Image: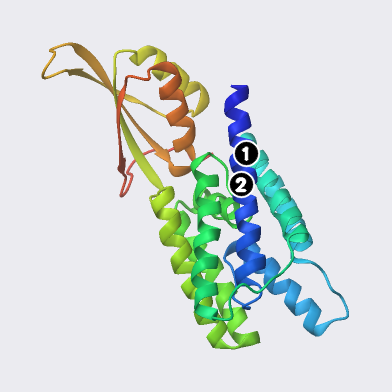
Amino acid sequence: MLWLQTKKIVIVVAGALLNAIAMNLFLIPANVYSSGFTGIAQLLSRVLSDHTPLHVSMGFLLLVLNIPVAILGWMKVGKSFTIYSFLSVVLSSLFLSIIPITKVSHDILLNAVFGGVILAVGVGITLKWGASTGGLDIIAMVLSRMKDKPVGTYMFILNGFIIATAGLLYGWEKALYTLVTLYTSTRIIDAIHTRHEKLTAMIITKKADELKKEIQNKLVRGITMVPAKGAFSNEPRDMLMIVITRYELFDLERIIKEVDPKAFTNIIETAGIYGFFRKD
């Protein structure tokens, strides 16, 4: 368990470092905006510098914006998820302050694409290990649970606000390049993690009772058990079917590896759910 937590922290540190590199070496020098709270902090920092005597660093604003969101996440999403997400935010703020803003390329398109790719790798590996980069992820998850609509809908609306504001204040060309960054980062995150908000896991195992107990202890999800039989071996088994959110995928994978490493698991997209699905 200690080794697992250590690896998770290392991943969160690496993700935060990649986010800071993407911002300070590619997106900020090109005046291309990121998504989520990082983009909001970037936009606020520039607005304050351009229109007021205040010069507030983006890293500081990112940290301040995420404090109330972390409290919300602690109450509504989950303690472990929120702790690692806030750690990611703190580290991102630190790296943003340490790494100097340097223009690597004068080509705005290259900056938009490579910044988006590096940012997405950082976000993708963080999500894959059961955390997030905070801010928008947590807000979108809370809104999704309240209204039972896809997380992606709220992500799109909130990111659309950033793009529209950037376009109105600093020209629509920058806003269009921001769209390039958002598209690039979204595709990379989908490839590293998953684009599906809900997933169905079908687990073929000989240790159904132990697995069921651990899953229900840690995920509090309903499970359907179906008797199964190996076509080649004719050995009796059980199939456990469970629907989870994408943020629970990491925990489910760890449970299966710990309880029954030989279990066969098929993870598939869930297009929709009818009936009760626990939201809190």
Q: Secondary structure at mark 1?
A: helix
- Residue 253 position within the rendered picture, expressed as x and y whole percent measured from the top left: 43, 30
Q: Determine the CA span between mark 1 and mark 2.
A: 6 Å
Judge left or right: residue 133 versus residue 110.
right
Asked which quadrant contains residue 239, the reply is top left
| Camera sees residue 182 | yes
Mark 1 near mark 2, Cβ–Cβ under 8 Å? yes
Residue labelled with disc 1: 10
| Camera sees residue 149 | no
For the C terminus, give its image quadrant: top right
- Residue 256 position within the rendered picture, expressed as x and y whole percent measured from the top left: 41, 23
Q: Where residue 14 is drawn, which disc sits there?
A: 2
- Residue 78 position within the rendered picture, expressed as x and y whole percent measured from the top left: 60, 37
Judge left or right: residue 228 versus residue 72.
left
Kind of residue indicated by mark 1 = Val
Kind of residue indicated by mark 2 = Ala
Q: Secondary structure at mark 2?
A: helix
